[in-house]
Amino acid sequence: MALFEIETFSHIVITCADDEDGARQVLYDNYPSEEAIRITKRPRDAWVISKSALGISGKVEVCDLARECLSKASGDKLNAIRLYMQQTGCDLERAKKTIESNIVYGW
């Protein structure tokens, strides 16, 4: 299986599939309303996201509440941030960092 990067207007999905059609099917199974605007077969079998590029420094703990918000928001980061702020009462900056750091770990 190869590693594919699928870009939509709202998400970047990383998935393993046998071919591009299989990768497209993974997208439609999980995000049926999303349209793939770009599908790229990655040259290696790993995907790395730099935490410093996301503005995250130091050790980050996985937050079950943040992951739950991401799941409820179907991966929509802005909606997940709003949900997290509503449930915790924290400010926008803290919610943004928490949600973004937990995107790295998946949900």
Image (cartoon, rainbow, N blue to C red):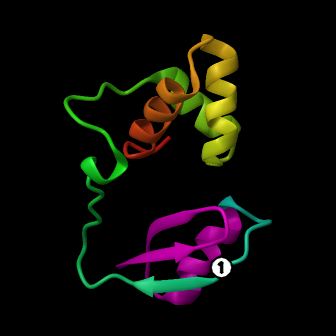
Farthest-out residue, top: 89
What kind of residue is marked 1? Ala
At horizontal 28% and vertical 47% (from top left) the residue drawn is 51
The answer to whether 82 appears left or right of 16 in the picture is right
Instruction: Check the picture and name the quadrant holding the N terminus.
Output: bottom left
Residue indicated by mark 1: 36
Farthest-out residue, left: 58
Q: Is residue 93 above or below residue 44?
A: above
At horizontal 65% and vertical 62% (from top left) the residue drawn is 10
Q: Residue 41: percent from the left, percent from the top? A: 39, 86
Please tell me whether mark 1 sits on a helix, a strand or a loop.
loop
The answer to whether 53 appears left or right of 81 in the picture is left
Q: In this view, does 53 lie above or below 22?
A: above
Neighbor class of circle 1 (other Cα within 10 Å; few <14, some 14-19, many 20+) is: some
Q: Residue 58: percent from the left, percent from the top? A: 19, 31
**Of 82 and 102, which appears nearest the observer?**
82
Name which quarter of the figure residue 50 lies in.
bottom left
Image: magenta residue range:
1-29
The answer to whether 79 appears left or right of 55 in the picture is right
At horizontal 50% and vertical 29% (from top left) the residue drawn is 93
Q: In this view, does 76 lie above or below 4?
A: above
At horizontal 62% and vertical 38% (from top left) the residue drawn is 71
Q: Residue 32: percent from the left, percent from the top? A: 77, 65
Name which quarter of the figure residue 40 lies in.
bottom left
The answer to whether 23 appears left or right of 47 in the picture is right
- Residue 6 lies in the magenta-colored region: yes
**Of 38 and 54, which appears nearest the observer?**
54
